[in-house]
Image: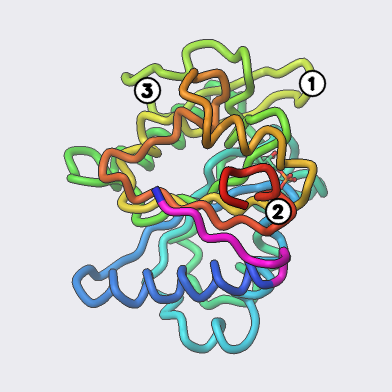
Amino acid sequence: MQLHIFKDAEETTIALADWIAALIQKTLEVNDRFTIALSGGETPKKLYQTLGAYPYIEKINWKKLHVFWGDERFVAFEDQNNNAKMAYDSLLSHASIPSDQIHKISTDISPQESVEEYSKILYKYFDNKQATFDLVLLGMGDDGHTLSLFPGSENLSDNNSWVKAINSKEKGERITLLPSVVNQSSAIAFLIAGEKKAPVLKKVLEEQEQKYPAQLIQPLNKELHWFIDREAAKFLKGN
Ligand code: 6PG
């Protein structure tokens, strides 16, 4: 695991954009595609806007990208709270990624049908493969949730499934990837900004006891990167 701490959210975002562009370039030297799972929420919006503009919009080989989502709020694509809509508005509508390489989590069918549909797509891509995604981007709530894996949710460590429908009283219906498929990825990067996240970030990174869903993210190959701004890092040892 590596911590990458920067003075503010903007510097952290640029550093992550550079790191992503370099990882894509390195991967495409040996593979003919790059598979990425995007995160939702507020924090990554600036990152997507940055990747959707110069210089990244010119230097990244977008045609080779295959895009997925880590989770989705069960609202229509047109809804402001839809993670796919946010990514389209801030990045995908500007990048020349072939539309059949963009795999939204469907919210116009039942949650169970959506779980089955998304699972089928993932098995087609990754079943019997050494690793799953080349990169998974994650965020974390100030309660220590990540993806739509909330504290107290059941069966988060189910290793037989890759996708799950969650119905959280607080956050509503969601479709989410499970740690089982995320931890088989080649690389995982959290983007964390703002002092609101500081108390739980200290617990997630420094406490042994596994109380927070974000602690379930432990890639088999240890390629786990935390991109954090100084405010969020303020309680971490040595900071
Ligand atoms: C979602 C996300 C979720 C997010 C955290 C942090 O769909 O909401 O995938 O896991 O990363 O809630 O959200 P913020 O960046 O808005 O704080």
| Beta carbon at label 1 within 8 Å of ligand 1 | no
- Give the SS element for disc 2: loop
Tell me the mark number nearer the camera, choosing from 2 and 3.
2
Alpha carbons under labels 2 and 3: distance apart? 31 Å
Query: Of callouts 2 and 3, which one flags the residue occurring earlier in the amino acid sequence?
Result: 3
Of callouts 3 and 1, which one flags the residue occurring earlier in the amino acid sequence?
3
Residue behind mark 1:
170
Q: Secondary structure at mark 3?
A: loop
Q: Closest to the observer: 2 or 120?
A: 2
Look at label 3 and name its amino acid. Ser
Q: Amino acid at mark 1?
A: Glu
Tag 2: Cα neighbours inside 10 Å, few (<14), some, or many (≥20)?
many
- Please provide percent x and percent y for residue 211: 56, 18
Q: Ligand 1 is found in which quarter of the picture?
A: top right
Extent of the magenta region = 2-10
Q: Which residue is mark 2?
A: 193
- In percent of the image, x 34 and y 51: which residue is there? 223
Counting residues from the start of the chain, the first of labels 1 and 2 encountered is 1
Does residue 114 show up? no
